[in-house]
Amino acid sequence: MCNEAVLLLLGTSGALTIWAPLQPVVALLSIALLVAAAVRRLVGEIDCPVGLPGSS
């Protein structure tokens, strides 16, 4: 979908000269955002201890 939109907006030569070099940067940014979201989500799981039923 994204590559098709880039082709429509920039044309073939524009996609190859402008978009292609940016794709690895966009990929790394997306991975970094996924890791940040996962860490933020899991911090609450670590910081919230749960007691066992029946223990005092």
Image: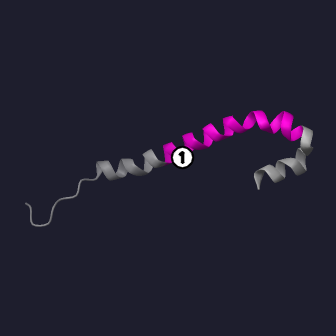
Which residue is at a point 36% across and 51% down the rendered structure image?
Answer: 44
| Three-letter amino acid code at the position of disc 1 | Leu
The residue lying furthest to the bottom in this view is 54
Badge 1 crowding class, 10 Å Cα cut-off, few under 14, some 14 to 19, many 20 or more, is few
Quadrant for the C terminus in the image: bottom left
Camera-side residue of 9 and 15: 15
- The residue positioned 43% from the left and 45% from the top of the image is 39
- Please name whichever residue, 3 or 39, is drawn nearer the observer in this view of the structure: 3
Queried whether the magenta region covers residue 20, the answer comes back as yes
Residue pictured at 89% horizontal, 51% vertical: 8
Q: Position of residue 4 (x, y in %)?
A: 82, 53
Would you place residue 21 above or below residue 43 in this image? above
Residue 52 position by quadrant? bottom left
Seen in the picture, residue 20 relative to 9 is either above or below; the reply is above
The percent position of residue 18, horizontal first and vertical second, equals 83, 35
* Dot 1: element: helix
Q: Nearer the viewer, residue 45 or 8?
A: 8
Q: How many marks?
A: 1
Report the magenta residues as a range.
Answer: 14-37
In this rendering, position of residue 18 left or right of residue 13: left
Query: Which is nearer the eye, 24 or 33?
Result: 24
Q: Which residue is mark 1?
A: 34
Tell me which colouring the rendered structure shows. Answer: one colour
Residue drawn at x 9%, y 66% as measured from the top left: 54
